[in-house]
Amino acid sequence: MAKKQEIPIKIPDDVLSGVYSNQMMVRHTREEFVLDFANLFPPQGVVTARVIVSPGHLKRMIGALRDNLSRYESRHGPIIEAEPPACPVPDLPIILTTLILVRLAISSSFRNFSVTSVISICSVFVTQFFAEVHNV
């Protein structure tokens, strides 16, 4: 049986202080998982760290987190999971109307529509959509 070798780990000064995250988003491909940690504070959020790991390493991380969470709760009591923030449904007629106008503009049904008009419509749509979703 091979003897485990301890490898010293240095934490650079700019990483040592850590970053705050109140949201995590996960994506994956066959070869890797991408974990984006974000700090959401309306009207916007910012990704504060991105960690890319292999599927095998992610499974080990989940096991380590599960073990630590179990030890934490046995010492401090159960953690009460917070409700996810409510996400209101945007106004469907506005979304549909905007998408129809964009489709018509792109298909040249309106000959006088310019690229600027399409960009303007898309900009208004995105602004209204996110304003409704995030209550800003």
Image: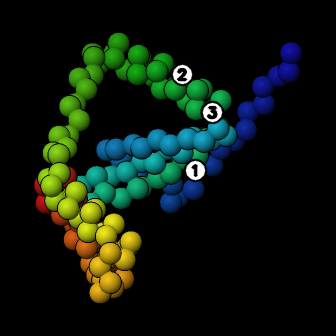
Residue placed under numbered mark 1 in the picture: 11
Residue closer to the observer: 46 or 19: 46
Residue placed under numbered mark 3 in the picture: 55
Residue placed under numbered mark 2 in the picture: 63
In this picture, is 3 found above or below 46?
A: above
Kindly report the distance in space between the C-alpha atoms of the residues bearing marks 1 and 2. Answer: 23 Å
**Tag 1's secondary structure?**
loop
* Amino acid type assigned to the residue bearing label 1 in the image: Ile
Question: In the image, what residue occupies the spot 21% across and 57% down?
Answer: 95
Locate residue 79: give its quadrant: top left
**Colour scheme shown:** rainbow
Could you tell me if residue 11 is visible in this image?
A: yes
Question: In the image, what residue occupies the spot 42% across and 55% down?
Answer: 48
1 or 2: mark nearer the eye? 2
Residue closer to the observer: 125 or 35: 125
Locate residue 127: give its quadrant: bottom left
In this picture, is 109 found above or below 26?
A: below
In the rendered image, residue 73, in percent from the top left (x then y), is placed at 33, 17
Residue closer to the observer: 117 or 47: 117
Q: Are marks 1 and 3 in contact (CB under 8 Å)?
A: no
In the rendered image, residue 104, in percent from the top left (x then y), is placed at 31, 70
* Amino acid type assigned to the residue bearing label 2 in the image: Gly
* Amino acid type assigned to the residue bearing label 3 in the image: Pro
Q: Tag 3 or tag 2, which sits nearer the N-term?
A: 3
Residue closer to the observer: 50 or 33: 33
In the rendered image, residue 87, in percent from the top left (x then y), is placed at 19, 44
User: From the viewer's perspective, is 10 left or right of 108?
Assistant: right
> Where's the C terminus, which quadrant?
bottom left
